[in-house]
Image: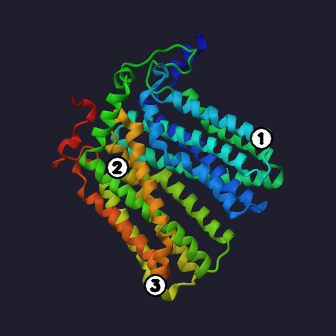
Amino acid sequence: MANSKIYAGVLPAFSDSTRLRLFLGTMLYLAQGFPQGVIFYALPTWLAVNGASAGEIGTVAAAATLPWSLKFLMGGFVDRYAYLAMGRRRGWLIGAQLVVVFIFVSFAIIQPDPSQTLLIAVLVCALSSATATQDIALDALVIDLTPEEELGRLNGFMFGGKLLGIAGGTAFTALLIESYSLQVAMIGSLAFFMIPAVTAILIRERPGEKILPWTNGKASPEALSASPDAWIPLLKTAFAAMMRRDVLIVLALLAIYGAHQTVMDSSSALFAANVMDWGETRFSSLIAISNVGSAIICLTIGGWLVDRLGPKRMALISGFGAAAIISSLVFSKEAWGSDTFFTIWYLAASLAILQFYLAMLVLAMRVTDQAAAAINFNILMGGFAMGGTLSGLSLGAIEAFGGMGALFTAAAVLLAISTSCAIFLSRALGPVGETGGDAGDDEVPVAALP
């Protein structure tokens, strides 16, 4: 107990330190990205190499994706229930990480054969559910405790950590599977995951709270006042928050951007394979280079630019810029087949889209009401996922209509429409402290309404 007192007195709380927020956000998104690299990339590759059919791999992929499509449902429980002595979100965060540890251990003990599709799908769904819950709790914690003027930089650090985690989870796990076995890969993945994940145990949300259930501390007044004590008031608050003008505009922006991303990613892969005649390794290497470059941007100037210019202005600049870059491919058919042109085009488009994505995340966080942060933020991100699903169903028709040119035209147009939504957002979503313009009732926190 004495050590707990000393320890609690030395370390600042998440709410009190900008540097701590940047560090913790990066570490926890690194921990989140690592299992995603395992389940979305390393395991499907392992299945393919061992002769699994497209249908079997698709079953595992669907199991991995399902929990992320239903995050808004879990968000209600994260908002409603909490062990407040440890903060509103840390209990969920740590609990989700313990489930990740359990599933990695289960994978190592069971050692499923590649032919055991259903068993693998169940394990993958459980692992993905835990990772999605970690994401819900962490995003809600960030919305609760981060000043608005820091959201851009913090999102840059978090997304940079996630990109590095996905890259590490993919490469590290694949290397261990190929060199040793699935069992060794799962044990190694567990060890790698725990290094950044342990930071959630070391840091409190607010001063005076417990580090762990058996240490000294108590619920903060802020957590007690913000935590809903019944479902009906929580759902009323969440519904009222979703009906605000800026929230609905951001929801439309996210859904249309999700449609763009599916078209863009699929079109780029098809272009690399069918026009450039590149193999999987070459295009995967370009994606890896893009991810590393994106991570560097995120960890340096990406988030800072969003804070400096404001998420609304950054969305307009980067969104229209990215749409113009994508369109340049459609009007440069004479350069199709040039490795240099395609590489430069892909990297330029990816970095411009990254800035739009960061601005979009900050917009979503800025319009999210703190009282129902887990529900509302994940409804917004659910719109993003739904847009991607719907556009994916139309890819065949678009290609049949006009080939690769039509696909990239659709990607550019969708991004331009998504960006245009930002024009109608209130000026309150500019740089923090900027005055002017009528933000309407979007300036009034829903939680403060009677």
SS for callout 3: loop
Tag 2 residue? 363
SS for callout 1: helix
Q: CA distance from mark 3 to mark 2?
A: 34 Å
Amino acid type, label 1: Ala
Q: Which mark is residue 332?
A: 3
SS for callout 2: helix
Q: Position of residue 346 (x, y in %)?
A: 52, 71
Q: Depth-wise, is mark 1 or mark 2 nearer the camera? A: 1
Mark 1 or mark 2: which comes first in sequence?
1
* Neighbours of disc 3 within 10 Å: few (<14), some (14-19), many (20+): few
Mark 1 or mark 3: which comes first in sequence?
1
Mark 3 or mark 2: which comes first in sequence?
3
Q: CA distance from mark 1 to mark 3?
A: 50 Å
Amino acid type, label 3: Ser
Amino acid type, label 2: Leu
Give the image quarter of residue 51: bottom right
Residue 217 falls left or right of residue 363: right
Q: Which mark is residue 108?
A: 1
Q: Residue at coordinates 36% horizontally, 35% vertically from top-left?
A: 372
Residue 21 falls left or right of residue 105: left
Q: CA distance from mark 1 to mark 2?
A: 41 Å
Q: Residue at coordinates 60% horizontally, 14% vertically from top-left?
A: 3
Q: Position of residue 272 (x, y in %)?
A: 59, 75
The reply to whether residue 353 is visible in this rendering is: no
Query: Quick check: 151 above or below 7?
Result: below
Q: Residue at coordinates 54% horizontally, 60% vertically from top-left?
A: 293
Q: Residue furthest top?
A: 2
